Image (spheres, helix red, strand yellow):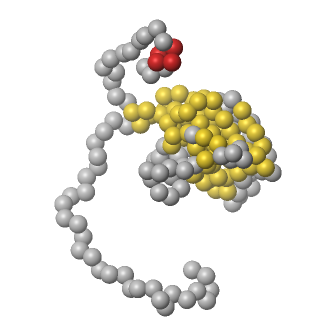
Amino acid sequence: TRPGFDDRSWQEAQRQTAPKGTLRAQGHDPIEVAETIRPVDIRELSQGVYVVDMGRTLAGWTRLTVRAEAGTTVRLVHGERLNSDGSVLARNDLVPGRCQTDEYVCAGGGADEVWEPRFSYKGFRYVQVSGLPAKPGPEQVLGRVVHTRVASTSTFSCSEPFYEQLD
């Protein structure tokens, strides 16, 4: 809270009974990295803001390599499309909040820091990156394609190249 903030109009929290039952982990196959892809393009949208194009839509996350001062915050906004001004459209009508955004706070110390989220993934083609000390190179912002480790039970092939990509 901020000094002087007036919370007198707030209602007090109400005590609730805990839900019944046992909390259990949902059993399913783990998500694993299937492929790492390099961006096909990195453009400067505005000063210090870059749009990275992975070249195709993927389910996964971004692997970030950065060297910056301690406390530097790097923001990664993921999306499948671009707005008319070239910024990343990160809207998701199914999940409220900033589910398409990751933030990393640098530890500093003069060495490269490598970070990737391990508890969420996104659907995206584009990544809007801000907070870096300089324009990133393609090896600094990599796409990590993920999927569950489910055994294949069938294959698909046809003579139409568009449908071949479904396999």
Residue 150, placed above or below residue 45: above
Residue 52, placed above or below residue 5: above
User: Does residue 107 appear in this view?
Assistant: no
- Residue 137: % across, % down: 74, 36
User: Does residue 6 appear in this view?
Assistant: yes
Depth check: give the residue in front, 46 or 106: 46
Name the residue: 46% across, 8% down.
159
- Residue 70: % across, % down: 71, 58
Residue 122, placed above or below residue 164: below
- Residue 110: % across, % down: 75, 49
Name the residue: 50% across, 50% down.
92
Q: Quadrant of residue 69?
A: bottom right
Depth check: give the residue in front, 38 or 86: 86
Name the residue: 39% across, 85% down.
12
Placement of the N terminus among the 4 image quadrants: bottom right
Name the residue: 48% across, 12% down.
160
Depth check: give the residue in front, 114 or 146: 146
Residue at the front extreme of this rendering = 84
Residue 12, placed above or below residue 141: below
- Quick check: 29 left or right of 62? left
Residue at the left extreme of this rendering = 21
- Residue 7: % across, % down: 51, 87
Placement of the C terminus among the 4 image quadrants: top left
